[in-house]
Image (cartoon, rainbow, N blue to C red):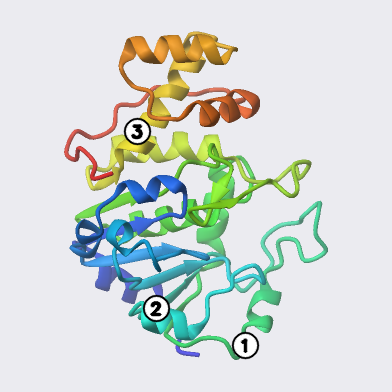
């Protein structure tokens, strides 16, 4: 296994135009040739390209993944998609306790399990980088996508286009597969609404962070729900129609109303540099 260090990655990605493509259904709002025009295309976990290249592009320069047993991408698939680098979400270390798994926050099992897997150079983040994100989320485990975004912000690209993220409001992942939270009682489980809030905070602080229009729309609609103390789907739809938004389909909004709890949200204004490609 050839290990690459963070300095090497920063040298590679600094000043480049980078696209991170998540696996939410909203990723298909893109045009494939626009994605392929980026210097580097980053895809997450069990991404899909086959039958979707006209929307999603053809390349996966970097595969960013959790690399647990749920990640099924073969080296042959990654080679076909022109992958050149594995980037791992988790350190090869024990980071925290877990309340729902005996493996928990000791991620060494991933690397034991993948000992003979790697087909390209590998980047494994230092423990302090992972823990910084964990603490940022009030000691909750980050999603793979959010970890990826944070990693690439550190590399200082000229543009970081972010698409295919709906923060589980569609209850769908891998474009068209049902998603559900298997451990809703986990006290350190994912906090997708907080990840959205932080992403939009990043977009206000770094001119190169460019969430697509769908992400910006979800954020504005969640602020509408919060600021107006809305608690019914009809109230939300009426407010959003008046605002001429409605980025989220009705079923997305219903999911949000059923799960949306937050505190301490601050309205931030994203950078006007990019209008978004999605």
Tell me if residue 163 can be seen: no
* Labels 2, 3: front one: 3
| Residue situated in front as seen by the camera: 242 or 270 | 242
Instruction: For mark 2, give the secondary structure.
Output: strand
The image quarter containing residue 127 is bottom right
Residue marked by disc 2: 85
3D distance between C-alphas at marks 3 and 1 = 40 Å
Q: Tell me: residue 84, above or below residue 146.
A: below
Q: Secondary structure at mark 3?
A: helix
Label 2 to label 3: alpha-carbon separation: 29 Å
User: Label 3: how many residues lie within 10 Å, few (<14), some (14-19) or many (20+)?
Assistant: some
In the image, residue 83 above or below residue 191: below
C-alpha separation, residue under disc 1 versus residue under disc 2? 16 Å
* Residue 152 found in image quarter: bottom left
For the C terminus, give its image quadrant.
top left
> Disc 2, disc 3: CB below 8 Å?
no
Residue that badge 1 annotates: 115
Residue at left 49%, top 24%? 265
Residue 242, percent across and down? 34, 9
Q: Which mark is residue 216?
A: 3
């Amino acid at each position: 296994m050839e290990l690459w260090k963070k300095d090497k990655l920063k040298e590679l990605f600094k000043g480049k135009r980078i696209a991170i493509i998540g696996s939410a259904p909203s990723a298909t709002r893109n045009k494939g040739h626009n994605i392929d025009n980026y210097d580097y295309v980053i895809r997450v976990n069990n991404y899909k390209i086959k039958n979707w290249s006209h929307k999603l592009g053809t390349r996966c320069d970097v595969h960013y993944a959790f690399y647990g047993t749920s990640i099924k991408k073969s080296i042959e698939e990654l080679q076909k998609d022109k992958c050149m680098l594995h980037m791992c979400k988790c350190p090869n270390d024990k980071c925290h306790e877990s309340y729902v798994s005996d493996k928990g926050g000791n991620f060494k099992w991933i690397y034991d399990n993948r000992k003979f897997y790697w087909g390209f150079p590998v980047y494994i983040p230092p423990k302090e980088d992972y823990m910084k994100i964990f603490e940022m989320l009030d000691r909750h485990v980050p999603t793979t996508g959010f970890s990826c975004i944070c990693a690439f912000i550190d590399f200082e690209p000229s543009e970081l286009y972010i698409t295919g993220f709906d923060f589980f409001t569609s209850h769908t992942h891998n474009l068209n597969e049902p998603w559900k939270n298997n451990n809703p009682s986990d006290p350190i489980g994912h906090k997708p609404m907080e990840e959205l809030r932080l992403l939009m905070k990043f977009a206000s602080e770094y001119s190169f962070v460019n969430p697509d229009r769908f992400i910006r729309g979800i954020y504005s609609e969640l602020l509408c729900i919060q600021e107006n103390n809305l608690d019914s789907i009809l109230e939300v739809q009426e407010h959003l129609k008046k605002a001429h938004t409605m980025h989220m389909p009705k079923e997305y909004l219903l999911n949000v109303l059923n799960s949306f709890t937050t505190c301490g949200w601050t309205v931030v204004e994203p950078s006007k540099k990019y209008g978004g490609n999605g």
